[in-house]
Amino acid sequence: MRVLGIETTCDETAASIVELSYDNRGIIRSNEVLSQIAQHAAYGGVVPEIAARAHVDVIDRLVARACEVAQVGLEDVDAIAAAAGPGLIGGVMVGLTTAKALSLVTRKPLIAVNHLEAHALTARLTDGIAFPYLLLLASGGHTQLVAVRGVGDYVRIGTTIDDAIGEAFDKVAKLLGLGYPGGPYVEQAAHKGDPERFSLPRPMYGRPTPDFSLSGLKTALRIEAERLQPLSERDICDLCAGFQAAVVDVVVDRTRVALRQFTEVAGHPSALVVAGGVAANMTMRQSLTRLAAEAGLRLIAPPLELCGDNGAMIAWAGIERLRLAMVDDISAPARARWPLDSSRDAAGQKS
Ligand code: ATP
Ligand code: MG
Ligand code: FE
């Protein structure tokens, strides 16, 4: 089984060919990603109109390239998958419409993938783990703890009541005059800083429900930064280290609570999985590895190129759905919002 996956929900245009291996993992034949970061950097964030136009400019070329690298033609794929949301609607429409056109021309089934489901299933592509597992999805737009019980079967255990973790990293980077997107810059600076110089709050720490709140932490950091003006290099590094340490403490605490609650909704987890762009953060990965070990579990974190947005995760979600005959038709809508725990199945039992 072989699927083409297309991703255009945010600021990466991506296309990939993935095959199903005999041991039920994915073999990535190609994984082409074109980042638009340079086009948005001057604005300190993604500009939706620029993003949509940039996707249009490169999508055809990128799909052709994904096929070329994989040495397959469109006649050799079993389905065409595209992220149909959630995301910036203009961009989503570019990828989904391209997939629909290719599906019509080739008469191959269309699969409209939830971008969050694709992040959620990446651990099965790389490690072939069984359901159920606990997923910490930490990306630019989402922060959720989810019991993954099966394809299309997700129970949200916890979520953020304000900012997503990636968003908080981005805002802190902006505040400190670092680059965009902020996560990698904050991590680099934190590496050189003293995490204990500033005592920043750990919002929600110890609460019985595994939810997150990050805006208070961000505000506390801003107050410290304003007090210190002008900021020295050392100040910036210490602020980043303090921020990252606070976020990691909160993430570990919230995930520990979610592991306890997991049993009630899904039984015994096969693993602890972290996914989404923030999963690239090494300090977070180390702390989560320790937490998983405490619970007798393995931490599965994607290789760095599969943490951020990519086409391979969309193609893989397509394979997972195609195996269960969960295909879509040409009327599948592009969705700006699409909660993971509502993506039951293609027939729309619940949506
Ligand atoms: P969503 O998946 O919720 O729709 P998105 O697709 O924009 O959002 P991703 O591309 O999965 O999000 O992740 C991007 C986010 O990950 C950015 O906010 C970025 O700052 C963050 N990020 C990337 N690398 C790191 C890192 N090393 N440490 C912390 N955060 C990081
Ligand atoms: Mg992105
Ligand atoms: Fe994403």
Image: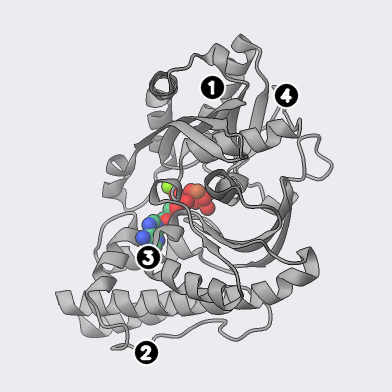
Q: Does residue 203 sit above or below 340 in this rendering?
A: below
Q: Are marks 4 and 3 in contact (CB under 8 Å)?
A: no
Res 242 seen here: yes
The answer to whether mark 3 is within 8 Å of ligand 1 is: yes
Res 213 seen here: no
The secondary structure type at the circle numbered 1 is: helix
| Residue at mark 3 to residue at mark 1: CA–CA distance | 36 Å
Q: Which residue is mark 3?
A: 282
Q: Rate crowding at label 3 as few (under 14), some (14 to 19) or many (20 or more) other CA atoms within 10 Å.
A: few
In the picture, the quarter occupied by the N terminus is top right
**Which residue shows up at 40% across the image and 58% down it?**
280
Q: Three-letter amino acid code at disc 4?
A: Asp
User: From this viewpoint, which residue is outermost toward the front?
Assistant: 22
N-terminal label among 3 and 2: 2
As rendered, which of 178 and 268 lies closer to the eye?
268
| Residue at mark 4 to residue at mark 3: CA–CA distance | 40 Å
- Name the spot of residue 158 as percent of width and height, x first: 65, 68
N-terminal label among 2 and 4: 2
In the picture, the quarter occupied by the C terminus is top right
N-terminal label among 3 and 1: 1
| Residue at mark 3 to residue at mark 2: CA–CA distance | 22 Å
Q: Three-letter amino acid code at disc 3?
A: Met
Q: Which residue is mark 4?
A: 329
- Name the spot of residue 305 as percent of width and height, x first: 39, 46
Of badges 3 and 2, nearer the viewer stands: 3
Q: Does residue 68 sit above or below 228 in this rendering?
A: above
Q: Which residue is mark 1?
A: 98
N-terminal label among 1 and 4: 1
N-terminal label among 1 and 2: 1
Q: Are marks 1 and 2 in contact (CB under 8 Å)?
A: no
Residue 199, label in figure: 2
